Image (cartoon, rainbow, N blue to C red):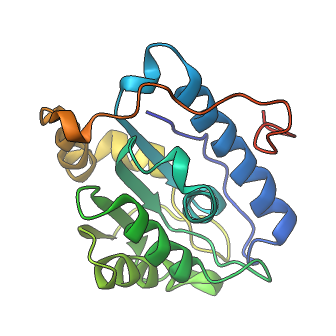
Amino acid sequence: MIRPAFAPPPAAPADADTLDVASRRLLGALQYVATHPFLRYCRIAVLTQGVGASAALAAMATRPELVRHRLHALSVCQPAALSPAGDVAAFAAQAARIVGTRTPLLVCDTQDSGETGGVGYAVHDAWRSAGGRATLVHVRGYPVYGRARRFDGSRYFGEVPSALLELLRTLRTPLTQRQRPLGHGVSRSASSPMLTGAS
């Protein structure tokens, strides 16, 4: 399971540099999984929030070989608007087509998401329109921060874990031979841009 730390984000939409850094961090983690002698055979869940959620969808859309056979559950809490990096709902639709209908998506958002509101709902709708399975959780009565009206997803799921646990239960379903991730992984070439700047 890959989960970033929470930090209350600014209200402004994410810029291209912020998105690029977050995408590279996730891609670096996925590259590690793909080349690890044991982990490359495992299914993974990616839990994200804010800019990290948008970056995950963008990374999936641009590097499909790292997620196509490994990603089996995805959670996005209040994905941030992207400016001028692209339309996060379009990334979501493309990512859904890449991973197929077997990968469930959990979207959490508040009814009032401030200046960057509506992105989570657009991601949910785009994923479903592309044929994917998606669940939308409306977070009510929980502390939010700043003009962006964002909540701490890690803390929220610690106190209200039911939706996330239901998502993670999908990882317990036995894999068929056809569903197993490729054993050869992805080569770790020196020219790969994924690990440049990753931390």
Residue 57 location, quadrant: bottom right
Left or right relative to 97: residue 187 = right
Relative to the observer, which residue lies in front, 184 or 194? Answer: 184
Is residue 114 positioned above or below 148 on the image? Answer: below
Q: Which residue lies furthest to the top in this view?
A: 37
Residue at the spot x=64%, y=44% of the render?
A: 26
Left or right relative to 153: residue 181 = left
Residue at the spot x=75%, y=62% of the render?
A: 19
Q: Can residue 81 be seen in this view?
A: yes
- Residue 65 percent coordinates (x, y): 53, 49
User: Which quadrant is the C terminus positioned in?
Assistant: top right
Left or right relative to 198: residue 165 = left
Q: Can residue 152 be seen in this view?
A: no
Is residue 150 positioned above or below 84 on the image? Answer: above
- Residue 195 percent coordinates (x, y): 78, 36
Residue at the spot x=27%, y=58% of the render?
A: 104
- Residue 196 percent coordinates (x, y): 86, 39
User: Which quadrant is the N terminus positioned in?
Assistant: top left
Is residue 92 positioned above or below 103 on the image? Answer: below
